[in-house]
Image: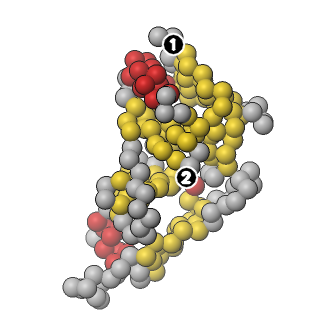
């Protein structure tokens, strides 16, 4: 097996902007070159903590989670790329390529869990979407609601600027603040 793999037609997602380019996986590094700007993003393969394979709107996605918590997503893979990519990642990055099942139920309720530097929204233990917390510019809370506001990205054609989560009141204790209770449960604030 070669110690280099190249994928010339992938798309890097950065805060909602889709940047076409070339992904090059080498024994010691990951390199993405943006076709439009020529900008090169690079990091060491020793920084990769987790490799995930997700089915998304633009085909299949390689999601690399670094030890620092940052997330890099590359879309446009084909099903046939999985075996070759998995062997490469196991051999050189010592990390298997984990298939992640996405929830396709369309439900608007579920669990929000913090994992590393992202907020994962899950239904029946399957990922619906994840939000890198570096994309969040501001948060506000009210009695039954948490609002996330996002950085505007001028490179994206469309921007998600705000996302609200409704947290229902506990019927057994209607006087308690459900946002405060959930924040204590996930360890965001102390009791």
Q: Is residue 97 left or right of residue 72?
A: left
Q: Secondary structure at mark 2?
A: helix
Q: How many marks?
A: 2
Badge 1 is on which residue?
A: 3
Q: Residue 130: in sight, yes or no? A: yes
Q: Tell me the crowding category of disc 2: few under 14, some 14 to 19, or many 20 or more residues within 10 angstroms, Cα based.
A: some
Given residues 145 and 127, the one toward you in this image is 127
N-term mark: 2 or 1:
1
Residue that protrudes farthest toward the front in the picture: 80
Residue that protrudes farthest toward the right in the picture: 37
Numbered label attached to residue 13: none
Give the x, y percent position of residue 104: 43, 57
Residue that protrudes farthest toward the bottom in the picture: 175
Badge 2 is on which residue?
A: 134
Give the x, y percent position of residue 58: 59, 45
Given residues 78 and 17, the one toward you in this image is 78
């Amino acid at each position: 097996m070669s110690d280099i793999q190249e994928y010339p037609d992938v798309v890097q997602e950065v805060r909602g902007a889709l940047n076409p380019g070339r992904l090059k996986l080498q024994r010691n590094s990951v390199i993405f070159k943006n076709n439009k700007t020529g900008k090169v993003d690079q990091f060491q393969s020793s920084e990769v903590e987790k490799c995930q394979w997700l089915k998304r709107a633009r085909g299949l996605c390689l999601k690399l989670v670094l030890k620092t918590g940052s997330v890099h997503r590359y879309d446009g893979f084909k099903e046939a790329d999985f075996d070759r990519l998995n062997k490469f990642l196991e051999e050189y990055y010592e990390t298997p390529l984990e298939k992640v099942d996405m929830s396709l139920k369309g439900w608007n309720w579920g669990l929000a869990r913090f994992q590393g530097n992202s907020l994962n929204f899950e239904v029946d233990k399957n990922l619906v979407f994840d939000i890198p917390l570096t994309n969040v510019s501001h948060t506000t809370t009210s009695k039954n609601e948490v609002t996330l506001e996002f950085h505007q990205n001028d490179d994206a054609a469309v921007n998600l600027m705000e996302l609200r989560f409704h947290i229902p009141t506990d019927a057994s204790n209607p006087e308690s603040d459900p946002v405060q209770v959930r924040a204590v449960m996930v360890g965001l604030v102390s009791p």
